[in-house]
Amino acid sequence: VPSSGQSLVEIVNSSAQFSIREMALAKIDDQSQLAEIVANHSIAKIRQQAANKLTDLAIIASTAEKIKHSDKGVYRLLRKKVDSANALQKAQKQQQLVLDKICTDLEAQSRLSLNPLFAAKVQSLQQQWQQLTEQKSYTLSNALQQRFDAASTQAQQKVTAEQSKKALFE
């Protein structure tokens, strides 16, 4: 690595040795510098490596648009990143809706009068919640967890009170 005070970006852009360019690129974390390399570097492999290091979705999307017609391979790589992030976001939103519905159902169940299926329905909702929240692809908000806990506790108290009542009459 030259000691004349060259920046890492300058080394990536001008070093005669490819391996030195790669080492300099590996040390760059600044998203705007990486995007600049993706958009303007003359060597496809360097553009691709820089594209792989991009993590900021806004920068990835804008860079993809800039290179759309000049580098199809890197464009596809960036689009794949954007599409994956969008799919993950959509899945998380869908899971949020399902968890919200479980809370709503459990709260509604707690307001209903006891029926023969009450305990089974409460247990079913609690199991659904547990299965969904065990998946690590979703970050659960504290508010939603507290809402579920409150509804679950209320329903469970109703079940326990009913069981106690039945035990007294047996």
Image (spheres, grey):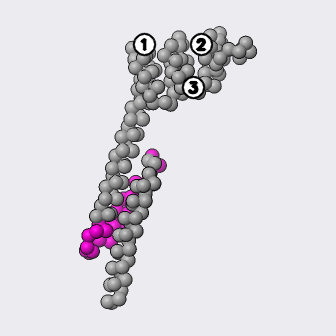
Q: Is residue 47 magenta?
A: no
Task: Determine which quarter of the picture holds residue 27.
Answer: top right
In percent of width and height, residue 106 lies at 32, 63
**Sequence order check, earlier mark of 2 and 3:** 2
Residue 137 lies, with reference to residue 43, above or below; the image says: below
Q: Residue furthest front?
A: 143
**Residue at 42% of width from left, 63% of height from top?**
149
Instruction: Say which residue label 2 marks.
Output: 13
Instruction: Say which residue label 1 marks.
Output: 70
Q: Which residues are magenta?
A: 109-137
- For label 1, the SS is loop
Q: Is residue 116 magenta?
A: yes
Q: CA distance from mark 1 to mark 2?
A: 18 Å
Q: Nearer the viewer, mark 2 or mark 3?
A: 3
**Residue at 53% of width from left, 17% of height from top?**
37
Q: Nearer the viewer, mark 1 or mark 3?
A: 3
* Residue type at the position of mark 2: Asn
Q: CA distance from mark 2 to mark 3?
A: 15 Å
* Residue type at the position of mark 3: Asp
User: Which quarter shows the N terminus?
Assistant: top right
In percent of width and height, residue 29 lies at 59, 27
In percent of width and height, residue 161 lies at 36, 79
> Image check: 113 left or right of 94?
left
Closest to the observer, 43 or 3: 3
